[in-house]
Image (cartoon, rainbow, N blue to C red):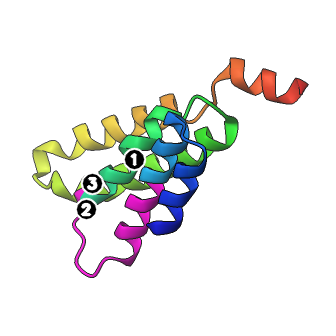
Amino acid sequence: MAPLLAFVWKRPDPARFACCVALASLNSFMLGYHVHEKAILLAILPLTLVAAQSLQCARVFTRLSTIGHFSLLPLIFTPNEYPLKIMIFSMQNLAGHPPPAGRCLQERQH
């Protein structure tokens, strides 16, 4: 985390800080010895703050949130909840996959 801290220290910015927190959380999730399914939320939540700033951040957020929410599905384990969890996961994916239209047009023009 020291390189991330130095990166933010040189040019402080809230968006840069949120990206660095998400990256540090994702590193601890990927390299952790004993990690629970809910630990991926520590990386997803800071990315929600910067997802609308660029198309690249939106793509990373969409992929990470899809994988993270899919990993949480085994926590809903009763047979009565199965249709509900599939419906909620499908709706989240359908609503979350299109990138923000205004940002995409702005980035394509520049």
Residue under circle 2?
Answer: 37
Q: Is residue 29 magenta?
A: yes
In the image, taking residue 21 as reference, residue 107 lies left or right, namely: right
Q: Earlier in the sequence, mark 3 or mark 2?
A: 2
Image coords of residue 109 (percent x, y): 89, 24
**Quarter of the image where one finds residue 70:** bottom left
Work out whether residue 92 or residue 38 is closer to the camera in this orientation and state it: 38
Per the picture, the main secondary structure of the magenta-coloured stretch is helix
Q: Quadrant of the C terminus?
A: top right
The relative height of residue 103 versus residue 17 in the rendered view (above or below) is above
The residue most toward the bottom is: 33
Q: Closer to the observer: label 1 or label 2? A: 1
The span picked out in magenta is 22-38
Secondary-structure class at tag 1:
helix
Residue that carries the numbered disc 1 in the rendered image: 44
First of labels 1, 2 by sequence position: 2
The residue under the point 38% across, 59% down is 25
Identify the residue at horizontal 17%, vertical 56% (top origin): 75
Question: Which residue is label 3 attached to?
Answer: 72
